[in-house]
Image (cartoon, rainbow, N blue to C red):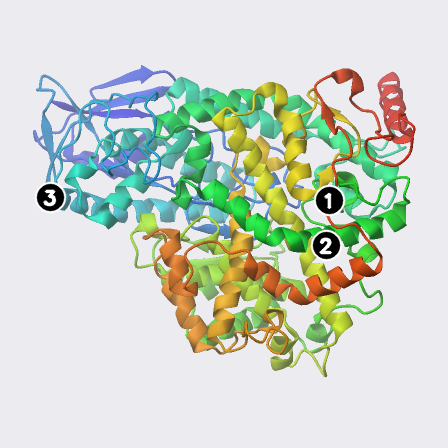
């Protein structure tokens, strides 16, 4: 009798041999090739030698991976790292947390590579494993056409029992518990190896470390499919232990890796092709047809953030979408089809349901819209004020009193953050908000001193001392002798002792806040380290970032900086406070509807309510509905404007950013109440925005209660442990910005500004004949002429001239 391993890649054969301890087995008697993979038959000397291969690839959790292909010159994480063109849509590294919304967040799912018996045995033959007997997996796929029950876990019926397709593995609770314990040990070891390879690459970028990092991720992928085939057959009827069943559920959802090999290869190639389009896109400068090669980072981002030339901004906006989204529309349509097939193989009705799985609520989508409705009145006040300021800058012929905001004049390529237009919208010019960078330099601050102060902040909350491995292994300054990916990130090496931060720290206030944010991830790692590996993660994909951002709200307060001796005297006056809140609001508030639309749009497509001939126009309907933003020129279905955003090209969920942004204010409110620094009954004497939880043991206790749970319980229970609430609550966002909302309301009343926006015409049409035209008349503005803009003409002429020259 022989043991047959499911197909694995040629590159990992020797690693499998090491793990199997081939001293106890004979040489490989035969190797069969299936597709582009290998099937290995290993014949043990003893008839019942147990062989176990364990691994993890947690696609329902969200940490970071990056693309390896392309140049390493970009400044955002999306330009660096590992390309998801391997065995799943997001082959992931475990235990890495990064600080950047443009980062691709992903993570790990534990899986077990069980070995199927091959030979003249009964179909019900069993092989021994420690703690019990598990029947061989029959290798059949589940039926993708069966609907997932509403509510509960994927694959469950309404009565809580697991839907089954085909033979069911009979395994006792004790046997399964023993098996999962062994999985945890091997998983942690493999995770440590993987994270170490990613760390080596990011702290010493070269072809050798790049290849090693890619191979380390491939090891995870090679296990997934076989494990999925075993674990999704376990029936809940046999498993009454809630935590054990929860582990099985998490481990048996593997996303696109459930696709048959040929479809998985096709899926990965489609993602790779879209990312190649995105990462390879370059434009020419406005009115400079020979100055070309401009990439999104840094050149185009600088243009969108600093230019105040309407035509230049419009040209850059249009060109970026022409060179990215338009070229990937057909590819995206194919990705949608395969994503839905993969979701059905994971027992979900469609990819929308699969993406929402970590939030464990069948009504979560509608709950999110309710949260946005809570925040929307504040956003509308900000929107009205910013529209007036931009109308003053560009003129009423460009922007009318009631119109949505043109997307190209908001400070970045996507209008997701308006921070870069602070200089032309700040409420009190000349009254700058707090920045202690100069004082830090004068007092001799160093990166090491900044990290020591951050550790002291958490110790004051009665949280954990950092282990020695942190100080010996972390990279907190740029290394002079090698290329380092400097994006700040926190790393869990999966061995319950090694935790690190990678950051090219500068002595600035911004980096001082970031250091505290990254260290919050480490504190989270330390608190849930006693959980099984599958539960060592945030309660849902938004929790990790929410904790770090909640802490950052305390660090930047004048009170905290005064305690550190970085602020001399008082800066507590209305102009400084309003400017500070306004600056934060420009970043946080526009991002909420943007992040909501990013996934609302894709959920509609996955569910089939929007077809491919409506992709672009539906995008702009949602942008106008939730954000009050419109395109600068009329768009059509020849365009594919969502594809101008990295996360669309990479097919990465985005809603975690909405959840994390709301949660940070919800957590901050609860911690400040516990610290006695915020009283909702006295919002003007103890306002939330002034709170600093430094030295509050009670605030630390609440935070630890939530953190130590990891993802072992539904996120609503973890949230309750810290806040006493069980749902997302947008009212805390408005409470934090209450003084700013009052100020904006009074200012908009003073200037008789219209609050909200009215639909002022078509922003997108099916017909291509009308695409690319500047819209006036009864559409965008009060002018009465419909014509082609000078920017569009200039762009056309520049393209023609460039082709003639070339």
Specify which label sits upstream in the sequence, 1 or 3. Answer: 3
Looking at the picture, how far across and down is residue 537, in whole percent?
39, 52
Q: Is residue 571 left or right of residue 594?
A: right
- Say whether marks 3 and 2 touch (CB < 8 Å): no
The CA distance from mark 1 to mark 2 is 17 Å
Q: Which quadrant is the C terminus positioned in?
A: top right
Specify which label sits upstream in the sequence, 3 or 2. Answer: 3
Dividing the picture into quarters, in which one does residue 323 lie? top right
The CA distance from mark 3 to mark 2 is 62 Å
Element assignment for label 3: loop
* Numbered mark located on residue 412 in the image: 1
Q: Nearer the viewer, mark 1 or mark 3?
A: 1
Relative to 497, does residue 275 appear above or below in the rendering? above
Dividing the picture into quarters, in which one does residue 762 lie? top right
Q: Which residue is mark 2?
A: 382
Name the foreground residue: 795 vs 142. Answer: 142
Specify which label sits upstream in the sequence, 1 or 2. Answer: 2
Element assignment for label 1: loop
Q: Which residue is mark 3?
A: 131
Looking at the picture, how far across and down is residue 317, in whole percent?
77, 35
The CA distance from mark 1 to mark 3 is 58 Å
Instruction: Kindly tell me whether residue 474 is visible in this rendering.
Output: no
Name the foreground residue: 397 vs 253. Answer: 397
């Amino acid at each position: 009798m022989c043991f047959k391993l499911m197909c694995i890649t040629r590159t990992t054969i020797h690693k499998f041999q090491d793990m199997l301890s081939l001293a106890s087995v004979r040489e490989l008697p035969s190797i069969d090739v299936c597709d582009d993979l290998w099937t290995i038959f290993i014949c043990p000397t003893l008839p019942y030698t147990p062989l176990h291969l364990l691994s993890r690839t947690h696609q329902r959790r969200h940490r970071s991976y990056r693309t390896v292909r392309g140049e390493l010159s970009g400044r955002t994480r999306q330009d660096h790292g590992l390309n998801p063109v391997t065995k799943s849509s997001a082959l992931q590294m475990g235990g890495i947390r990064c600080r950047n919304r443009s980062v691709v967040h992903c993570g790990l799912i534990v899986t077990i590579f069980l070995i199927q018996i091959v030979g003249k045995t009964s179909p019900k033959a069993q092989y021994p494993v420690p703690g019990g007997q598990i029947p061989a997996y029959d290798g059949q796929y589940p039926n993708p056409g069966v609907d997932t029950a509403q509510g509960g876990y994927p694959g469950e019926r309404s009565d809580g029992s697991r839907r089954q397709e085909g033979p069911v593995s009979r395994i006792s609770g004790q046997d399964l518990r023993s098996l999962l314990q062994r999985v945890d040990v091997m998983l942690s070891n493999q995770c440590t190896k993987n994270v170490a390879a990613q760390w080596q690459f990011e702290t010493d970028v070269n072809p050798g470390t790049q290849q090693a990092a890619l191979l380390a991720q491939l090891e995870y992928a090679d296990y997934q499919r076989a494990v999925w085939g075993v674990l999704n057959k376990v029936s809940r009827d046999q498993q009454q232990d809630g935590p054990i069943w929860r582990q099985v559920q998490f481990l048996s959802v593997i996303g696109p890796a459930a696709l048959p090999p040929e479809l998985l290869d096709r899926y990965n190639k489609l993602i790779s092709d879209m990312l190649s389009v995105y990462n390879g896109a370059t434009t020419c400068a406005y009115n400079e047809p020979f100055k070309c090669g401009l990439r999104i980072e840094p050149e185009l981002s600088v243009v969108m953030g600093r230019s105040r030339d309407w035509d230049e901004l419009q040209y850059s906006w249009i060109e970026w979408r022409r060179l990215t989204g338009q070229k990937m529309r057909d590819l995206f349509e194919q990705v949608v089809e395969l994503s839905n097939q993969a979701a059905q193989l994971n027992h979900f009705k469609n990819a929308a349901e699969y993406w929402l799985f970590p939030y464990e609520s069948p009504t979560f989508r509608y709950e999110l819209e309710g949260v946005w409705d809570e925040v929307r009145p504040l956003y509308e006040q900000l929107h009205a004020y910013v529209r007036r300021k931009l109308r003053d800058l560009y003129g009423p012929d460009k922007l009318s009193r009631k119109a949505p905001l043109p997307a190209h004049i908001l400070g970045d390529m996507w209008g997701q953050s308006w921070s870069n237009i602070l200089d032309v919208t700040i409420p009190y010019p000349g009254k700058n908000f707090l920045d202690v960078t100069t004082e830090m330099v004068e007092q001799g601050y160093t990166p090491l001193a900044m990290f020591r102060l951050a550790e002291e902040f958490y110790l004051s909350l009665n949280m954990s001392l950092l282990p020695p491995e942190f100080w010996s292994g972390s990279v907190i300054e740029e290394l002079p002798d090698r290329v380092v990916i400097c994006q700040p990130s926190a790393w869990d090496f999966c061995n319950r002792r090694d935790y690190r931060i990678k950051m090219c720290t500068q002595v600035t206030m911004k980096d001082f806040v970031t250091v505290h944010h990254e260290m919050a991830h480490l504190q989270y790692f330390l608190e849930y380290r006693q959980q099984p590996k599958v539960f060592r993660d945030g309660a849902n994909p938004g929790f990790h970032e929410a904790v770090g951002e909640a802490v950052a709200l305390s660090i930047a307060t004048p009170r905290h900086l005064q305690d550190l001796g970085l602020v001399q005297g008082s800066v507590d006056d209305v102009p400084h406070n309003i400017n500070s809140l306004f600056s934060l609001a420009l970043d946080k508030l526009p991002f909420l509807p943007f992040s909501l639309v990013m996934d609302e749009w894709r959920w509609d497509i996955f569910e089939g309510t929007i077809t491919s001939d409506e992709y672009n126009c539906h995008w702009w309907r949602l942008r106008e509905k939730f954000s009050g933003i419109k395109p600068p020129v009329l768009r059509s279905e020849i365009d594919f404007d969502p594809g101008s955003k990295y996360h669309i090209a990479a097919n990465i969920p985005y809603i975690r950013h909405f959840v994390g942004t709301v949660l940070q204010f919800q957590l901050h409110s609860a911690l400040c109440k516990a610290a006695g620094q915020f009283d909702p009954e006295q919002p003007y004497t103890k306002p939330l925005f002034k709170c600093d939880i430094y030295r509050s043991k009670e605030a630390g206790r609440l935070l630890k209660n939530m953190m130590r749970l990891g993802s072992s319980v539904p996120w609503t229970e973890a949230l309750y442990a810290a806040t006493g609430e069980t749902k997302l609550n947008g009212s805390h966002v408005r409470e934090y910005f209450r003084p700013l909302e009052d100020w904006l309301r009074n200012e908009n009343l003073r200037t008789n500004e219209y609050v909200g926006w009215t639909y002022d015409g078509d922003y997108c049409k099916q017909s291509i004949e009308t695409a690319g035209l500047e819209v006036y008349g009864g559409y965008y503005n009060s002018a009465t002429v419909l014509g082609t803009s000078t920017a569009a003409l200039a762009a056309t002429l520049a393209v023609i001239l460039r082709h003639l020259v070339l």
